Image (spheres, helix red, strand yellow):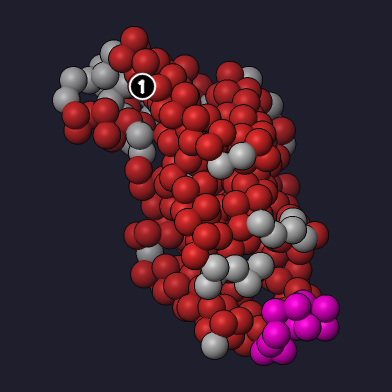
Amino acid sequence: MTAGDLWASLRPAQWVKNGFVLAALVFSLHLTDLAAVGRSVAAFVVFCLASSSSYVWNDILDSERDTLHGDKRGRPVAAGRVSGRAAAALSAGLAVAALAGAGALGLPMLACLAAFLALQAAYSAALKHVPVVDVVSIATGFVLRTAAGVVAAGARMSVWLFLSTFLLALFLALGKRRSELATLGADAPAHRPALGLYRRVPLDAVIVALALAVVALYTRYTLSTEVARRLGTEHLCVTVPFVVGGVFRYLFLIYGRDQGGNPTEALLGDKPLLAAVALWAAAVVVLIYF
């Protein structure tokens, strides 16, 4: 066991998901508030620790199944490079550190993080084996990340932010399941039992419906007079093409290249998708703050 193996067990590339913690900072107009920025960055770090704790714990529970997966068999725990005992100690240490950090940020943040850790533990132990419940659990985890960002920024959880986060996360989670079905084929149920109960045709219909819902909801948000008044701009609608491009590029990766199995890898590895997200973020900041 090496330091590199322990680091790989944390899955640092997946920390990009905790970017949802920072969403409220931007849309609550607190990006120029240094105190709010500091709390939000601290919350981001705390959720990175909690996420890594959950990943390590999940690797312990899934070590046997992961040996059947072409990519996951190389993970340190599944490959035997990190022992179960060492992984358990690492997971517990990260969870304790995350809880301590959240506690330092206040009781509401501690409640968000504790709920997140409890959800992740339940997901790893049982929820991921139940169709539909598995993807709803994933989406709820993203909502908790966003809620923590709202707490850190001293903002208010709007209906728009809640629905956008939930629908987008649900879309990504179902896209991941669709790609797992395509990649694993007949071996899918052996790797993840819930996959044996998913069917491609209805799953495809739901994924497309969610993609359209995400675009429609965001478009409606940008055209809202209430939002325009609160953010101080009526031109947020110019960011809609970036959202449309990002969503449909991800659909292309799912159906055209079978690359939706790892949304983070798809985001970081696909230049058009990464460009769409980066341009959207830059445009939002410029329109709201400049």
**Residue depicted at 62% across the width and 26% down the height:** 118
Q: Residue pushed farthest top?
A: 85
195 in relation to 193, above or below: below
Residue 4: image location, x then y, percent: 19, 33
Asked whether 224 or 83 is in front, the reply is 224
Q: What segment is highlighted magenta in the picture?
A: 225-235
**Residue depicted at 74% across the width and 58% down the height:** 156
Helix, strand or loop: magenta stretch: helix
Residue 278: image location, x then y, percent: 45, 72
Asked whether 251 or 53 is in front, the reply is 53
Query: Can residue 66 be seen at all in this image of the molecule?
Result: yes
176 in relation to 92, above or below: below
Q: Residues within 10 Å of mark 1 (few under 14, many from 20)?
A: some
Query: Could you tell me which quadrant the N terminus lies in?
Result: top left
Apparent side of residue 206 relative to residue 290 in the rendered image (left or right): right
Question: Which quadrant holds residue 25?
Answer: bottom right
Does the stretch in magenta take in 59? no
Residue 237: image location, x then y, percent: 68, 84
Which residue is the site of mark 1?
90
**Residue depicted at 36% across the width and 38% down the height:** 11
